[in-house]
Every structure is written in C-alpha cells, then in structure tokens.
Amino acid sequence: MQIFTISTVLVLLLAGCDAFYGVDSHTSLPGPVDVRCVNGALASIAEAGRVAYERSESRSTEIMPKQRSVLTIMHVWTYGEGGKDVLQINQTPDGWDYRNARSRMGVAVPHDEMVRFVPVMTTVNRVMQARCGLQVAGLKPKPVGDTKARQL
C-alpha cells in the first residue's frame, strides 16, 4: 500500500512539471566573465531593446560524485520583444555556463517568434565575443524541449 501511495504521489508531482519549449544557444565557459562588460555590451545592441539585469544566488549540497556545498551565482538579463529573451550566465564551482534563449514553460513559442529571435540571438552572441571575449559567436541555435527545429 505504501509503495502504491508513494508512486501515485510521484506521478502527480511529475505531471505538474511542465517542460520548456523554444530555442537557445548554450555552452560552458572557462571564465571568469566580466558581468559589467556583458551588461554594457547587451545594452549597446539596438535590437536588444530594453535590458533588465538581476543577480541571485542559490546554495545547494551536491552528494554525487563528491559531497560538497555548492554556491551558484546567477546573472540574468532580459531583453528583446517584451523582455521575453533571456541571457543567463551562471557561475558555479566548476566554471561558467552561458545560455541565450527564448523559451516558455508548458507552452510552445510560436515559430514566427523563434524566427525573429534567432538573428537577435546571433547578434548578441557575436557582440559578447567581440566586446567581452566570451567564445560564443559560433554557437548554433538549438530547439528546447519538443520544439520543432524547422528552419531555425
């Protein structure tokens, strides 16, 4: 009876987890990343429109492969059409993670939105490399979730 109850609860919890859909480009960077440079570079791109920045921290404990406390510092910029685009650079104990995306949770991003976003994403990546030295100019757009990758 306990196993049935636990499995039912797990199924219900997992059913509530919506997937992300959209398009992104991402990579790991050796770091360090100059956050002020990224902020200025993104603000200099006309197609980026209004840029908003937020910094936050997340503390967790990693159990495998080694037990340790982990501090992740998240640098998040929203930009583009209605602030729907996200440039996120996370600083972890293992390095830096770069992600430039337009995605939504639980609902597909319309294909015409993704088509409009990809050139902006490409420009942002190129400017980040040219102005801040981040090796991201060659990143290719990739579908997120079950997004269809037709002509991105």
Image (spheres, grey):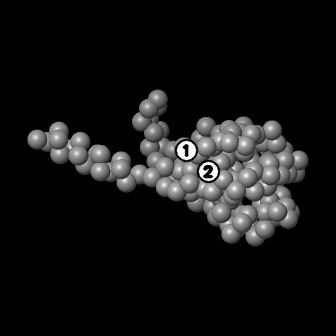
Instruction: Give the image location of residue 24, x and y in percent.
Output: 67, 47
State if disc 1 and disc 2 touch (CB < 8 Å): yes
Disc 1 residue type (three-letter): Gly
With respect to residue 149, does 75 lie above or below? below
Of 49 and 38, nearer the camera is: 49
Instruction: Give the image location of residue 95, x and y in percent.
Output: 65, 39
Residue at the spot 29% in from the left edge and 45% down from the top edge: 10
In the image, which disc is placed on residue 145? 1
Residue at the spot 73% in from the left edge and 52% down from the top edge: 115
Residue at the spot 17% in from the left edge and 41% down from the top edge: 4
First in sequence: mark 2 vs mark 1: 2
In the image, which disc is placed on residue 53? none
Quick one: SS at disc 2? strand
Disc 2 residue type (three-letter): Gly
Do we see residue 34 in this rendering? no
Do we see residue 112 in this rendering? yes
Q: Mark 2 points at which residue?
A: 22
Instruction: Give the image location of residue 55, x and y in percent.
Output: 63, 61
Residue at the outermost left position: 1
Quadrant containing the C terminus in the rendered view: top right
